[in-house]
Image: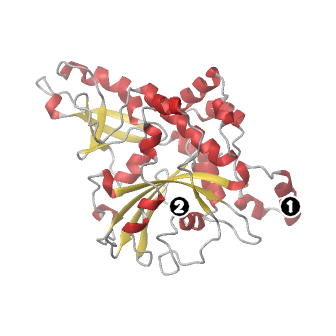
Amino acid sequence: MEAREYVWKGAIPLQIHLHESEVTTLPPPPPLLVLASRVGYLPLLIPHLKPHFGGALPPGADTVWFDYNGLPLKWFIPTGVLFDLLCPEPQRPWNLTVHFRGYPSNVLVPCEGEDSVKWSFINSLKEAAYIITGNCKNVMNMSQSDQSELWQSVMNGDLEAYQQVSLKLKLGVLEDEYTVKKNSISLRSKESNADTDVAGQGRIPVRLYICSATEDFDELEDAPQIDSWDKISYINRAVEVLKEEGKCFTLGDAVKTLLPEIFTDKSVINEDLSKTEVEDDKNAPCVSQEDNQDASGSAEERTEEICAAIKPHFSSNTAELKLLRIHGIEPKLEIPFSWVVNNLMHPEHFLHICVFIKLAQANPR
């Protein structure tokens, strides 16, 4: 529980500047310094931004969006994930630019502020529930008060309030292999028999963000800058944890099942490939057309890059994993995957993983 508390308290110091084209006063307004929750979303900062920059804006309707080094930031990706993905060498404070005009609808799906973020979150929760349990009735049947309390707990970073509501969804947790190993064999057997339906018997929703480069780099500060979302592959996959006697299913095993197109015996992770099946979630029938409209198309945007789009770009024998980051942490690949899931999953029950891969060559399409 202590690790989850640290995750929920995690925050990123932001220094937010108003774009110079929207400044109408002299001197220009100073940047806004604010702590942003890692499990939160950038549009939730709008109540802090408008009072600070409102007096310097030109006339017109507000359409708030952010960029980092000119790259428009996707608002439905958690703030901490954006930071881990776009700053291999962490920048503190993280310098962002806010815009109130000129929404880049060719890059970003529409966002109507908090409501859009809320429904994007709820739809993600439905997707996760479907992967874990085979349906999303538990989320669909939530009362309005529970739904509101759950969302408020995410907005406020309140883990205790979140758990009180999320426990009603019965999405469960994985059996902690690290803890089990420290217990006797008999106790382990009892726990296994008594907990056969934990977390859908081990189907874990994962969102994987892959940044690849053909040029090598030893220091993270030399990693190539991401200036286009085309350089990032974005995959939803389910990892099925199948337990083998005497073998712990590790984070490294999960990475190999997530990216079988890349990691083979000759790649940087060179143990035997796990027999775990990998199943795409792109067709999970738990989000209705109506829900998709409420989410302003975010569910479709989130799954735009699927497994089939990855393989042509990579040579499976030359991939080298340079960095793997979850919640700003760079965990060892030997760590039990059950611990990672139970402690580092996001509030919508997805595990978000950012990876940086160096390729010796790229196969043409």
Q: Quick one: label 2 or label 1, which is nearer the N terminus?
A: 1
Q: Which residue is mark 2?
A: 331
Colour scheme employed for the rendering of this structure: secondary structure
Residue 149, x across and y down, in percent? 60, 25
- In this rendered view, identify the residue nearer to me: 312 or 257: 312
Q: Is residue 40 above or below residue 68?
A: above
Residue found at x 66% / y 57%: 338
User: Closest to the observer: 136 or 36?
Assistant: 136
Pointer 1: what residue?
A: 189
* Residue 37 in sight: no
Residue drawn at 66 percent across, 27 percent down = 142
**Residue 29: image x %, image y %?**
19, 27
Which three-letter amino acid code belongs to the residue tagged 1?
Ser
Q: Secondary structure at mark 1?
A: helix
Quarter of the image for the C terminus: give it.
bottom left
Give the quadrant of residue 106: top left
The reply to whether residue 324 is visible in this rendering is yes
Q: Nearer the viewer, residue 353 or 25?
A: 353
Q: CA distance from mark 2 to mark 1?
A: 29 Å
**Crowd around label 1: few <14 · some 14–19 · many ≥20 (10 Å):** few
